[in-house]
Image (cartoon, grey):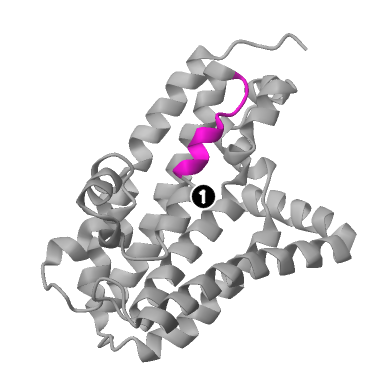
């Protein structure tokens, strides 16, 4: 952890060498997230509720999804940009260094400008939490924490899968954005509004619903099933097969020779 913080400090100082660029990137990330919020606002301004969910409930759901994705995109960005590491031969140098390759990829790129989205999520939390009608007890606070943690690990796992595919294809496969950026957009609403087929897919194939939909029902009091509260734990476990897949990809890797 001490070494990772050292890497993070170096990367932050490098990014702050161009302060105006960093500030504009951060503001840009905030505005992108804000434009998505406006879509939600106008939707509810017209219809009042969506599939029985109120405006403040959806904002709380949106904030959870946005926070999880922003944290993963900030700190696991090295895997999202892994195709460049493969194609330019950087992974050859990573393989001969004494540190674990996962650590080195994680520490190779940290996008601190993504805190712009995080600021948007915090603003949504500040508005939605007191107005959502949730009776905040210890179990609800734990549920919220598990949702954020589960979301971080699910998105991190998806980034790792994307990176691992680069061992076999060299270039990144853009269809993986459907499961990262796409699920972030889907996740601004409770997943049940998209129909049973989508909900099952995002439960059993890409386990977004495990941290977004099921614990959210427990959070807003629509179920008292304790398994719904603990569903994000299964989402956290999603990282295990992703790491196994990564190990298979590393064994398949062949040097660029550069």
| Count of numbered tags | 1
Horizontal side of 135 relative to 104 (left or right) equals left
Q: Visible in this render: residue 1?
A: no
Residue 158 in which image quadrant: top left
Indicate the quadrant where residue 163 lies. top right
Q: Is residue 222 above or below residue 79?
A: below
Left or right relative to 39: residue 189: left
Question: Magenta stretch: residue 176 in it?
Answer: yes
Residue displayed at 35% across by 37% down: 240
**Magenta residues?**
170-179
Judge left or right: residue 205 versus residue 34.
left
Residue 84 percent across, percent down from the top left? 70, 30
Residue situated furthest front in the rendering: 46
The image quadrant where one finds the C terminus is top right
- The residue lying at 45 percent from left, 71 percent from top is 63
Q: Position of residue 31 (x, y in %)?
A: 66, 70
Comparing 145 with 29, the one in front is 29
Which sits in the foreground, 20 or 193?
Answer: 193
Is 155 contained in the magenta span?
no
Whether residue 255 appears in this view of the structure is: yes
Task: Residue under label 1, please give it.
Answer: 181
The secondary structure type at the circle numbered 1 is helix
Measured from the top left, where is residue 171 in percent x and y? 62, 24
Crowdedness near tag 1: few (<14), some (14–19) or many (≥20) residues, C-alpha within 10 Å: few
Q: Residue at x 28, y 85 (%)?
A: 134
Estimate the x, y position of residue 148 in percent, counting from the top left. Answer: 40, 63
Q: Is residue 189 left or right of residue 112?
A: left
On screen, residue 230 above or below 40:
above
Seen from the viewer's position, the closer of residues 31 and 113 is: 31
Q: Residue furthest left?
A: 225
Q: Determine which quarter of the picture holds residue 101.
A: top right
């Amino acid at each position: 952890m001490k070494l990772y913080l050292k890497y993070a400090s170096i990367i932050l100082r490098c990014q702050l060498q161009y302060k105006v660029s960093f500030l504009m990137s951060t503001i840009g990330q905030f505005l992108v997230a804000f434009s998505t919020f406006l879509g939600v606002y106008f939707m509810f301004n017209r219809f009042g509720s969506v599939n029985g969910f109120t405006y403040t409930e959806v904002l709380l759901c949106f904030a959870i999804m946005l926070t999880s994705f922003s944290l993963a995109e900030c700190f696991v960005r090295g895997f999202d940009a892994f195709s460049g590491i493969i194609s330019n031969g950087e992974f050859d140098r990573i393989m001969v260094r004494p540190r674990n390759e996962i650590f080195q990829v994680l520490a190779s790129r940290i996008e601190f400008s993504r805190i712009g989205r995080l600021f948007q999520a915090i603003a949504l939390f500040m508005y939605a939490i007191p107005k959502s009608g949730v009776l905040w007890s210890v179990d609800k606070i734990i549920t919220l924490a598990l949702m954020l943690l589960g979301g971080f690990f699910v998105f991190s796992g998806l980034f790792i899968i994307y990176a691992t595919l680069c061992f076999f294809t060299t270039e990144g496969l853009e269809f993986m954005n459907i499961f990262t950026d796409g699920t972030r957009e889907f996740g601004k609403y409770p997943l049940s509004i998209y129909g049973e087929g989508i909900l099952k897919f995002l439960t059993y194939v890409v386990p977004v619903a495990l941290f977004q939909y099921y614990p959210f029902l427990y959070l807003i009091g629509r179920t008292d099933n304790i398994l719904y509260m603990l569903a994000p734990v299964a989402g956290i476990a999603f990282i295990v097969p992703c790491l196994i897949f990564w190990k298979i990809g590393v064994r398949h890797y062949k040097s660029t020779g550069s």
